[in-house]
Image: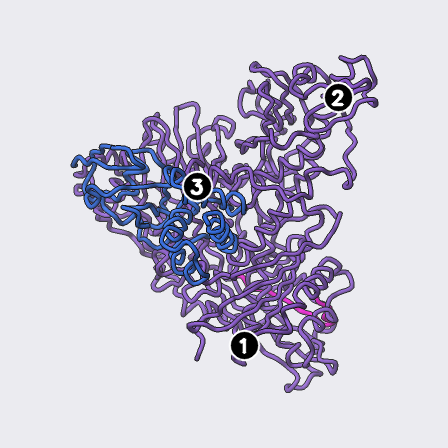
Chain colours: A blue, B purple
Amino acid sequence: MATYQLNVNGQRKQVDVDPSTPLLWVLREELKMTGTKYGCGISACGACTVHLDGVATRSCVVPVSFINERSIVTIEGIGADPVGEAVQHAWVDKDVVQCGYCQSGQIMSAVALLKATPKPTETNIEESMGGNLCRCATYVRIREAIKSASQQLK
Amino acid sequence: MRAATLLEKRLQIDRRGFLRVSAVAAGGLLVSLYLDLPAFAQQGNQAPPQKDYPPDAFVHIRPDGKILITVNRLEFGQGVQTSLPMILADELDADWSQVIAELAPAADVYKDPVFGIQMVGGSGSIAHSFQQYRELGAKTRGMLIAAAADRWHVSPDQCRTENSVVYGPGNRSARYVELADDAARKPVPGKARLKNPSEFRIIGKKVRRLDSRPKCDGSQKFGLDLDVPGMKIAVVSHPPVFGGKVKSFADKDARAIAGVREVFEIPLIQGSGVAVVADRFWTAKQARDRLRIDWDLSGIENADSTQLWFKYKELAHTPGNVAVSLGDSKAMDTITAGNRIIAEYEFPYLAHTPMEPLNATVQFNGDRAEAWVPSQFQTMDQMAISEVLGLKPEQVTFHTEFAGGGFGRRATIDAHVPREAALIAKRLSGTPVKLIWTREDDVRGGYYRPMHAHRVEIGIGPDGMPAAWRHVVVGQSLVAGTPFAAMLIKNGVDQTAVEGTADSSYNIPNFHVSAHHPTVNVPVLWWRSVGHTHNAFVMETLIDELATRAKIDPIVYRRRLLKAEARKLRAALDLMDEKSAGWRGSLPKGHALGISIHECFGTAVACAVNVSIENKRPKIHHATVAVNCGLAVNPLTVESQFQAGLGFGLTQLMAKGAITFKDGRVEQRNWDGYTPPYISDAPVTVDVHIVPSTDPPTGCGEPPVPVISPAVVNALAKLTGKRYRSLPLANLAG
């Protein structure tokens, strides 16, 4: 066990966990922030995507001991960001979700994409969203919502 | 099997029920459905037991003006948490902006009115509960009008309703919330007039989902997100071969990890496993990794995919039990070899792998229990938990949790996941326990779409149409030995294995379909659209091949071959033809058109795709889909289900879209080895068109799945000149 100070959505949090514990499970079980989802545990599906210093990161394979001072933003905090807010709004407007379980991760990846590439092409979208599995396969509407958010942010 | 007999009795429940109305302590109007106790529950019981659980409400007009509608189904993406309330709210003339919805717990009143158990499956949610929710809405409205009429001393006929308000003569009006307490003292009308479709205000409109926002900001709780005070986390080590038993295990290293509470053997449906209970998931998983288990695998059949293919193909050469036999069985003999096609197909096992890993939370308190399960089969899951704990089903308060997908995986007849959770909770009496299946447990845990071999011999007539058709299907039965067998096995044929072929919409004069159901040591389960996944693929690729051979346009050929009574499918085909005409004729070089049509679960679908080959894989640039699902309750949901359902259907075309066995062991472990479609694998755009209809609504959960794979390989056949009959689809040449 070790103690870690984390910066989550702009707030200081202290946790006392095994150093090997993935960030995903620290968020879900220690901080009770369950918006970040467990899907595979091997960074194959992207359901656990968070932003680590602004970079879309699979939290299921990042041990808590790696975090240090890096800022963590999760789905619970992304709405405070203008791009995050626009993406969430577009997701609701385009009625993207079905079961919804992967959508936290989809939204986190989409926000990272739009921050880096405000006017993404289909290829940009396929590359940036390419590791986010949606078993319902809501991909057609995910594409639409990303383009819609991009328009909104003009 | 006690569970089986109990279930059989439950399936025979005399479903006399009547509505009941009550005021609730907190105020408002509560409309419930009360069922007579089924006869078997009264046997040996002098008096009916106290009925404080389960709850039985369908609609609650609350003092805050919100109208809470209870949904008798699991919400797992299909959208019923929005569309069932739409139906009730429309007949109630409710203000939609004030409507909220919740998922019903397990209770007799929430059983599917047709299937007789509480479940989601067979695309039955809207089809079976449309009338039910309309009547509930209309009768509740009747009581509100009666309350207003009394208050104003006018006749109910002089009142009308709109947007949660009753209007009476002389500009009088009252909001529903103001009338709710009075309405709660009115008798429930025996009959209520239902609207004509022209009067619908909500049904038939594109209405956004009620659960969208919480699913976009992380606040929606799924079963896996549940946190009950004092809860522990459990994982189970399952045997490497189905049916394996624990001979002995060493848990010293596992128990050495701080936070590990219990390690013990539990019985499984077949064989046994070792459960690890800890304070946290990560602890439990690490401890499980450190277990050293000596398995007894003696006397167990080791499934092996290569050997199974050999056996299945051999079986396919002999006729099986007869599913359908139309016309002359000797007709084939009169057709020359040059006018025959012999086609052999292979379909592997498929895992559902819903995004949310399987889970169940159970707390056992001696004479009661509470369970939280993302369940497609509440009746079976509640019964299994009660059986394990030595309770009656009604002593288990069963909460239906939102599920992250399911596709059939959360509809197991043996309820093996809730059963494991209950076994563990029993040992930790008093402590809530959440059982989590890791993704590896899920991929390797069985309950797959069965592998199938098909062998089809077609004799072609002088007009290019099929004159004789002999078809043998080989695959495990989904229901043999279960309470569903009586319903679904006819003449030794599991109807789910031949659906889509035996009931084909095509007019083939001499048509013979039979089936073999070998027994294999691999648990199998319905996978979204069930038998249609493979049957539609076989039928639609062969019809396409026949059209190509006859040099007839694939749409024209299908139209010519459809039975006269295939009215819904013909309308879908015509609409797809019309809506895709604009792009079909002007495809870029290197692109090809693929066509497929199929009717299942009462819904007819026609699909046209624009496909090219990129990186040796099919690239689906566009799909046009026409749907005939009767009255579309929420066209937005229908559109979404089809846009995305096509993507789900592509699972079986993926290069790694197969579960395979060697020496009894599953060769894949996670989504790295069993890989469903990602964004680049799915169609880029899909336009969905709904055939205008006032026919009773039919479902849209399963019907999107079967059409896409055959449409795509039909397009590939044009690009490569090859026919694709073995799935998963290997990398393409070039």
Question: Residue A85 got which mark?
Answer: 3
**Dot 2 corresponds to which residue?**
B145
Q: In the image, what residue type sits under mark 1?
A: Arg
Task: Please indicate whether residue B384 sits to the left or right of residue B259 in the image.
Answer: right
Callout 2 secondary element: helix
Q: Residues within 10 Å of mark 1 (few under 14, many from 20)?
A: some
Question: Residue B479 got which mark?
Answer: none
Give me the chain letter of mark 2. Answer: B
Quarter of the view holding residue B709: bottom right
Residue B734 horizontal/vertical position (percent): 43, 80
Give me the chain letter of mark 3. Answer: A
Question: Which segment is the magenta one?
Answer: B506-517
Q: Is residue B476 above or below residue B64?
A: below
Quarter of the view holding residue B494: bottom right
Q: Is residue B195 above or below residue B34?
A: below
- Let me know if residue B413 appears in the view: no
Q: Residue at x 74, y 80 (%)?
A: B463
**Dot 1 corresponds to which residue?**
B723
Judge depth for marks 3 and 2 and give the one in front.
3
Callout 3 secondary element: helix
Q: CA distance from mark 3 to mark 2?
A: 43 Å
Q: In the image, what residue type sits under mark 2?
A: Ile
Residue B576 horizontal/vertical position (percent): 67, 63
Q: Is residue B707 magenta?
A: no
Residue B561 horizontal/vertical position (percent): 73, 70
